[in-house]
């Protein structure tokens, strides 16, 4: 499996879709719909029983997608996700045990932080790109803006509470590379197989300025 640096993953498009897949049969058409709309980096969360199979299916069937795993919390999750074909990993927080496992597995990581101390701990391990989570609940744009000077050199992918309306405010910040969000893949549209609607949401998202 070819890994790419997390910065390259974050620069593929302005938005990384956060996907919760309940029905394995929906994984490939969902990924195709998002890629058709210009979103190539896809985070499939480990929140459903079929998540690993969904990662494998997308990795095998959608060559233009760069499939990653989300909601990583344990070293065992890391190994399973890499075995399934994940090319990057996203986690809600910053766990040294999990980061060791990701490093050993060669999995580029986007770990979550919510404070300057966590960002500094991640930076000490050489990480320069972090997820700010949950972005809106933690103060959103004003907090990231306030971090830009004291935490110079660290960039963020804010995630949590972001949609088409507030994404531009985040993307305008100098320390934001991309944003994460589930709004481009609504649960109802996935259930109904409304892939045209998802491609439209993805197109709007991929057209955002960075
Ligand atoms: C999540 O917690 O599921 C992700 O951070 C996405 O959050 P969102 O649903 O608010 O986009």
Image (cartoon, rainbow, N blue to C red):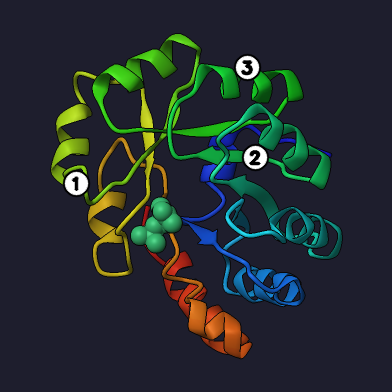
Q: Is mark 2 within 8 Å of ligand 1?
A: no
Q: Secondary structure at mark 1?
A: helix
Find residue 79 and report its image quarter.
Answer: top right
Disc 3: which residue: 100
Disc 2: which residue: 88
Front label number (2 vs 3) = 3
Please tell me the numbered disc located at residue 141.
1
Q: Residue at x 64, y 76 (%)?
A: 33
Q: Quadrant of ligand 1?
A: bottom left
Instruction: Find the distance from the CA under tag 2 to the CA under tag 1.
Output: 25 Å
Residue 202 located left or right of residue 86: left
Percent of width and height locating residue 11: 52, 45
The answer to which of marks 2 and 1 sits earlier in the sequence is 2
Q: Residue at x 58, y 67 (%)?
A: 38
- Where does the N terminus fall, quadrant-wise? top right
Find residue 149 and report its image quarter.
Answer: top left
Percent of width and height locating residue 83: 82, 40
Residue toward you, 63 or 172:
63
Residue 157 located left or right of residue 191: left
Residue 100 located left or right of residue 179: right
Asked if the residue under mark 3 is in contact with the one under mark 2, i.e. CB atoms within 8 Å, the reply is no
Q: Please indicate, yes or no, whether residue 180 appears anywhere in the rendered image.
A: no
The answer to which of marks 1 and 3 sits earlier in the sequence is 3
Q: Secondary structure at mark 3?
A: helix
Residue 17 located left or right of residue 31: left
Q: As drawn, which residue projects farthest toward the top?
A: 124
Q: Residue at x 54, y 45 (%)?
A: 71
Asked if the residue under mark 3 is in contact with the one under mark 1, i.e. CB atoms within 8 Å, the reply is no
Q: Please indicate, yes or no, whether residue 179 appears anywhere in the rendered image.
A: yes
């Amino acid at each position: 499996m070819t890994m790419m640096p997390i910065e390259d993953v974050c620069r593929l498009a302005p938005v990384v879709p956060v996907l919760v897949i309940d029905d394995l049969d929906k994984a490939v058409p969902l990924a195709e719909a998002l890629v058709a709309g210009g979103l190539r980096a896809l985070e499939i969360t480990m929140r459903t029983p079929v998540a690993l199979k969904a990662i494998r299916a997308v990795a095998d069937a959608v060559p233009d997608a760069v499939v990653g795993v989300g909601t990583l919390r344990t070293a065992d999750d890391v190994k399973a996700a890499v075995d399934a074909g994940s090319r990057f990993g996203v986690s809600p927080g910053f766990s040294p045990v999990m980061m060791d496992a990701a490093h050993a597995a060669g999995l580029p990581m986007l770990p979550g932080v919510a404070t300057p101390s966590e960002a500094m701990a991640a930076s000490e391990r050489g990480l320069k790109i972090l997820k700010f989570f949950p972005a809106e609940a933690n103060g959103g744009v004003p907090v990231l803006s306030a971090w830009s000077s004291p935490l110079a050199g660290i960039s963020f992918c804010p995630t949590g509470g972001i949609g088409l309306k507030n994404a531009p405010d985040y993307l305008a910040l100098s320390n934001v590379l991309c944003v994460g969000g589930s709004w481009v893949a609504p649960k109802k549209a996935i259930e109904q197989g409304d892939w045209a609607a998802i491609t439209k949401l993805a197109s709007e998202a991929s057209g955002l300025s960075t």
